[in-house]
């Protein structure tokens, strides 16, 4: 995690750094700092806590520098503290470094440097980098960085400045890094969002690249062997507004409300004339594949569980869904007859990336579904489907989930059609139903009063259960993750029929439970399970599209959602779960967009 930013040009570098860091706070927010070059020295301001603390420091001690680098941190090595904040200096305080990633061999490098007399001040892995660069430095910063990064194991995106030169040297391995080209000025960042207000022209350095940025020579890129290379400049068509709240109180609420458009845009991107074109250039004849793995983390994993149902139905091939951190260490049957579908909003999740690489090594065809064009997952996959959700900033994932479900439905239909497992009339019906989804999401958003009321009710409880069957069970799993991560209410989702095998022991008078009921054929069964909870005193809210008299008699409250076709019902039905979590979090006084201990992008293992 962590976000890094750098600026070199005529503008006020520190202000640009602080503005850039605001856009990257989703990557970590337990401390922040910046380093700028003033005359022949480098000044560092850094402190524990939110970026606003750094802003206060800057206001007390402003300067106007042409070159600066900055950092917003999600602690890995060493607690959040002033001293562990980035940037980090070498001993003479002439070389400053910001870093995103983890240096796996920092301990051995540190021991060696200590033996040579270097004194460390922080507990971070990062601090070895400025000292290592210093040990190679003879006036040529680029050469010193090149030598240093060759010794680093793990993941890193770094930006380095020195008191002796007017340049920024950056490097990346595994962690994301972009270089923006402005009007005679240059930006370095973990994500284009940090520089979008100034430019839309970006380079995406490859693994192992080292980049020197200077007024005199502009951007020079060198590959891992030190050869000068040319990387393609890309135009990023995202509005700078995408990274602002646009009048909403929180990014999460904005992103929840963006879901009708996000789903519509994802559908429009791949569907035309009642047909689907996924542009899969590298897939072989479908008949050669005999199994599919869907691999992801967190919310994306839940989308995968829903997608499995549709892919098995239309493509008629077994689908295994696994969590990337497990799959990367145990996936014995992946081979060249496997399709591995990776799902990742950010496209930078370390475990998902490792799963991707292992799968490629095993000969599988790798298709990714990501929301970030040019992300590492996107670049390393055989083919990519991009969800058109726009930047997702809130830590709690919302629009990424619904667009991932849409994308997986498209994959299921596409494979179903090509393999001849789905008839034309079935295909047409699916396409018609898909088109209705954005409107159904809008419908849920029109009536949020009852959701707010129920959020007010559940906010005072410390535990809560979701129950459901089939697709409803997975909607509950995603609902539970949302509640956990932003309201801190301990929430678990169970298959409705499983409660009586143990978890029902946790039900007492007024224990809140939420039942999802969108599947006609399973509704009666779930209602029976609700009765079992009611008999033990539970307070039951139903999120239901199947509203029968029996249900009305059985539960305490019903949050209605529109009926929808097959797995697509997960799209409107997840909205009340997202909103319940959002309002419960607000009512409990939490920081919705930046929940404790979390960061948006998990680029460490
Ligand atoms: O960027 P990714 O989709 O790979 O991220 C995966 C998870 O870290 C992410 O979905 C996480 O679970 C969210 N905070 C859930 O809201």
Image (cartoon, rainbow, N blue to C red):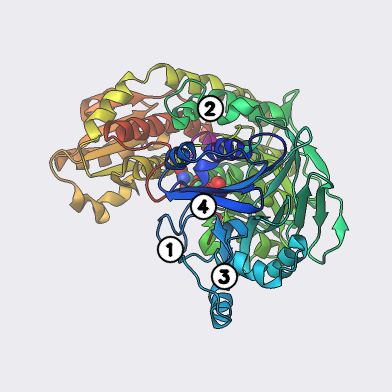
Residue named by callout 3: 104
Residue named by callout 4: 297
Residue named by callout 1: 78
Q: CA distance from mark 3 to mark 4?
A: 22 Å
Question: Can the viewer see residue 381 in this picture?
Answer: no
Question: Toward which corner of the image does residue 113 lie, by quadrant?
Answer: bottom right
Residue 106 percent across, percent down from the top left: 56, 72
Q: Earlier in the sequence, mark 3 or mark 4?
A: 3
Q: Under tag 2, what secondary structure?
A: helix
Closer to the observer: label 2 or label 1? 1
Q: Tell me the crowding category of disc 4: few under 14, some 14 to 19, or many 20 or more residues within 10 angstroms, Cα based.
A: many
Q: CA distance from mark 2 to mark 1?
A: 38 Å
Q: Under tag 3, what secondary structure?
A: loop
**Tags 3 and 4 in contact by the CB under 8 Å rule?**
no
Residue 432: mark in rendering: none
Residue 244, placed above or below residue 47: above
The span picked out in magenta is 397-402
Residue 220 percent across, percent down from the top left: 82, 51
Residue named by callout 2: 259
Q: Earlier in the sequence, mark 2 or mark 1?
A: 1
The yes-or-no answer for disc 4 within 8 Å of ligand 1 is: yes
Q: Under tag 1, what secondary structure?
A: loop
Q: CA distance from mark 3 to mark 1?
A: 14 Å
């Amino acid at each position: 995690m962590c976000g890094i930013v750098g600026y070199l040009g005529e503008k006020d570098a520190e202000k640009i750094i602080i503005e850039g860091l605001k856009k990257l706070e989703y990557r970590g927010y337990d401390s922040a700092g910046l380093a700028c070059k003033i005359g022949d020295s480098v000044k560092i301001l850094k402190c524990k806590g939110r970026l606003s603390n750094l802003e206060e420091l800057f206001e007390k001690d402003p300067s106007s520098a042409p070159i600066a680098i900055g950092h917003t941190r999600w602690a890995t090595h060493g607690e959040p503290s002033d001293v562990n904040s980035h940037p980090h200096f070498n001993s003479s305080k002439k070389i400053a470094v910001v870093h995103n990633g983890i240096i796996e061999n920092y301990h051995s490098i540190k021991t060696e440097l200590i033996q040579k007399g270097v004194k460390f001040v922080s507990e971070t892995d990062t601090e070895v980098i400025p000292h290592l660069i210093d040990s190679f430095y003879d006036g040529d910063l680029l050469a010193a960085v090149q030598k240093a990064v060759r010794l680093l194991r793990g993941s890193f995106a770094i930006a380095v400045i020195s008191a002796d030169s007017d340049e920024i040297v950056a490097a990346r391995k595994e962690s994301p890094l972009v270089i923006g080209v402005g009007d005679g000025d240059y930006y370095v960042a973990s994500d284009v969002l940090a520089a979008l207000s100034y430019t839309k022209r970006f380079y995406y350095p490859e693994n192992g690249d080292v980049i020197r940025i200077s007024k005199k020579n502009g951007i020079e890129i060198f590959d891992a062997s030190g050869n000068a290379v040319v990387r393609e400049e890309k135009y990023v068509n995202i509005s700078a507004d995408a990274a602002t709240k646009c009048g909403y109180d929180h990014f999460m609420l904005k992103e929840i409300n963006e879901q009708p458009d996000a789903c519509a845009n994802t559908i429009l991107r791949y569907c035309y004339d009642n047909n689907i074109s996924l542009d899969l250039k590298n897939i072989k004849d479908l008949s050669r594949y005999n199994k599919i793995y869907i691999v992801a983390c967190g919310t994306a994993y839940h989308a995968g569980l829903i997608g499995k149902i549709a892919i098995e139905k239309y493509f008629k091939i077994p689908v295994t869904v696994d969590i990337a951190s497990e799959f990367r260490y145990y996936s014995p049957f992946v081979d060249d007859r496997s399709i591995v579908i990776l799902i990742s909003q950010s496209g930078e999740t370390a475990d998902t990336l490792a799963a991707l690489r292992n799968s490629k090594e095993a000969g599988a065809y790798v298709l990714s579904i990501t929301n970030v064009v040019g992300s590492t997952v996107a670049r390393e996959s055989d083919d990519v489907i991009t969800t058109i959700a726009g930047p997702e900033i809130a830590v709690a994932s919302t629009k990424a989930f619904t667009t991932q479900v849409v994308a997986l439905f498209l994959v299921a239909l596409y494979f179903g059609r090509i393999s001849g497992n789905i008839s034309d009339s079935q295909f047409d019906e699916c396409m018609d139903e898909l088109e209705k989804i954005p409107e159904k999401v809008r419908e849920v958003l029109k009536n949020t009063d009852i959701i707010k009321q129920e959020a007010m009710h559940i906010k005072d409880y410390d535990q809560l259960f979701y129950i459901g069957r089939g697709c409803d069970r997975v909607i509950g799993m995603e609902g539970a993750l949302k509640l956990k991560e932003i309201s801190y209410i301990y929430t678990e989702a169970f298959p409705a029929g499983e409660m009586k095998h143990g978890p029902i022991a946790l039900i007492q008078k007024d224990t809140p439970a939420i039942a999802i009921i969108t599947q006609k054929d399973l509704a009666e069964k779930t209602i029976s399970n609700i009765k079992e909870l009611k008999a033990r005193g539970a307070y039951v809210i139903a999120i239901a599209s199947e509203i029968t008299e029996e249900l009305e008699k059985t539960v305490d409250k019903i949050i209605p959602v529109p009926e929808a076709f097959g797995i697509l019902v997960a799209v409107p039905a997840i909205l009340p779960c997202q909103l319940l979590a959002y309002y419960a979090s607000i009512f409990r006084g939490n920081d919705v967009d930046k929940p404790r201990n979390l960061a948006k992008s998990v680029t460490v293992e």
